[in-house]
Amino acid sequence: MSRGRLRVRSRGLRILYLHQFFMTREGTGGTRSYEFARHLVGRGHDVTMVTAAPGAPARRRDVEGIRVVEVAGASPDYVTATGAGYGARMAGFARFAAGATVAALRAPAPDVVFATSPPLTIGLPGIAAARRHARDARVLGGRRSRRIELRRGRPGDKLPQRP
C-alpha cells in the first residue's frame, strides 16, 4: 500500500532511529527515544535504533521489539559525555557520528529516518542515511520545517541547487 511518498507495508514502516543517548526506564536519563520507538513498534512498525555502546565491543540486541544497534567509541550516557572537557566531548561526538553513519548505511533501507539530538552531530548520519535511501527529508524544529533536497544517486553526486 502507498501513502504519498512513503512505502507502507502491511506490517508497517521500516524506521531507522538515530540517537546517541538511547535510554530505557532502567537507566538514568531521558527516555523520549525509547518511549517513542516502543510506541512505533506497538503500532506495527519495524524500528532499528542506532545508539552508543555502553562498552566494547558494540553489540546488537532487542529491547521490547526495538532492534538496537550499538556503536562503539562514544559515551551512551548524556551526563558523562557532556561533562567531559571540550576536546574529549567533541571527539566523542565525532566518533559516534562516524560509527552511526556506517551503521545507518549498512542497515536495511528505511522508509523513515529519525535523527534526534543531542548532540547536533547526529544530523550527519541522518543526512547520509536519508540521502542513500530517501527522496525527501525534512529538518523539524519548533514551529518551522525546512525541506532538504535529496535524490538517489551515486556517492559524490551533487545535490540539486535551490531555485
Image (cartoon, rainbow, N blue to C red):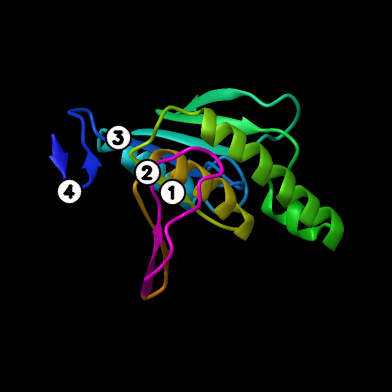
What is the chief secondary structure element of the magenta stretch? loop
Q: Amino acid at mark 2?
A: Ala
Tag in front: 2 or 1: 2
Tell me if residue 119 can be seen. Answer: no
Q: Residue furthest left?
A: 1
Taking the image as shown, residue 62 lies to the left or right of residue 55, namely left
Residue 157: say if magenta.
yes
Q: Earlier in the sequence, mark 4 or mark 3?
A: 4
Tag in front: 1 or 3: 1
Kindly identify which residue carries mark 1. Answer: 114
- Vertical order, 112 against 78 (above or below): above
Residue at 76%, 52% (x, y): give it: 80
Kindly identify which residue carries mark 4. Answer: 4
Tag in front: 3 or 2: 2
Q: Earlier in the sequence, mark 1 or mark 3?
A: 3
Kindly identify which residue carries mark 2. Answer: 134
Q: Amino acid at mark 1?
A: Phe
Label 4: which secondary element: loop
Q: Earlier in the sequence, mark 3 or mark 2?
A: 3
Q: Where's the C terminus, which quadrant?
A: bottom left
Task: Tell me which corner region of the image, top left, top right, bottom left or bottom right, holds residue 82.
Answer: bottom right
Marks 2 and 4, Cα distance to the nearest angstrom? 13 Å
Q: Amino acid at mark 3?
A: His
Mark 3 is surrounded, within 10 Å at the Cα level, by few (under 14), some (14 to 19) or many (20 or more) other residues, namely many
Task: Tell me which corner region of the image, top left, top right, bottom left or bottom right, holds residue 162.
Answer: bottom left
- Vertical order, 67 against 76 (above or below): above
Taking the image as shown, residue 146 lies to the left or right of residue 100, namely left
